[in-house]
Amino acid sequence: NYDSLYEYVEIYNNSGELLNISSLQLVDGGGNTVMISDQQLAAGATFLIARPGLLSRGIVPNITHDGGLSLNNRGESVRLVYNGQTIDEITYHSGWPYSAGHALTLDPSKYDTELNDEPSNWCASPTVYSVGSDATEKFSKVVD
């Protein structure tokens, strides 16, 4: 799938403190996992997990992965897991406001583990990141 080359997830530290995110895992609905090792995330900073395709667009993620983790275009559950415990989960579906090639972006005033579950708090980014046959999901996630 062409657009899966450009998928990414951003993790934002909304806590106001430096966070140790070593052992944090991003897990898709199929159980595919990306593990973060030896990393800290400053207050107000973003951590980018992406497929290597973004490198060709001049975007340098904190972690690249070629693993099985992917974001299904028609809906998916994605979890953040820390030390075996789910600290946040989001489930999106075709009714969410995304369109082909655009990132799915959370309203910055809604950076909260409860508010980020509401589709109305998300929008399609104005920038086109890739053009494929389906929508390319990319979204920001909050850690607090």
Image (cartoon, rainbow, N blue to C red):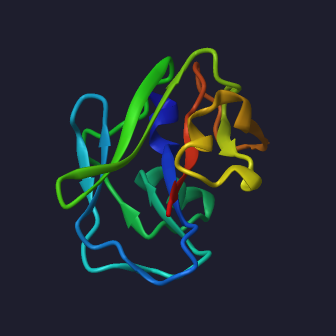
The residue that appears at 65% across and 28% down in the rendered structure is 119
Left/right of residue 86 with respect to residue 127 in the rendered view: left
Task: Name the spot of residue 76 as percent of width and height, x first.
Answer: 42, 26
- Judge whether 67 appears above or below 93 on screen: below
Left/right of residue 101 with respect to residue 4 in the rendered view: right
Task: Name the spot of residue 89 as percent of width and height, x first.
Answer: 41, 40
The residue that appears at 35% across and 43% down in the rendered structure is 79
Task: Name the spot of residue 14 as percent of width and height, x first.
Answer: 58, 67
- Judge whether 51 appears above or below 77 on screen: below
Give the residue at the far left of this rendering.
Answer: 84
Q: 104 or 56: nearer the eye? A: 104
Task: Name the spot of residue 47 as percent of width and height, x first.
Answer: 49, 67
Give the residue at the far right of this rendering.
Answer: 126
In the rendered image, which quarter is residue 126 located in?
Answer: top right
Figure disc tally? 0
Left/right of residue 74 with respect to residue 89 in the rendered view: right
- Judge whether 50 appears above or below 69 on screen: below
**Quarter of the image containing the N terminus?**
top left
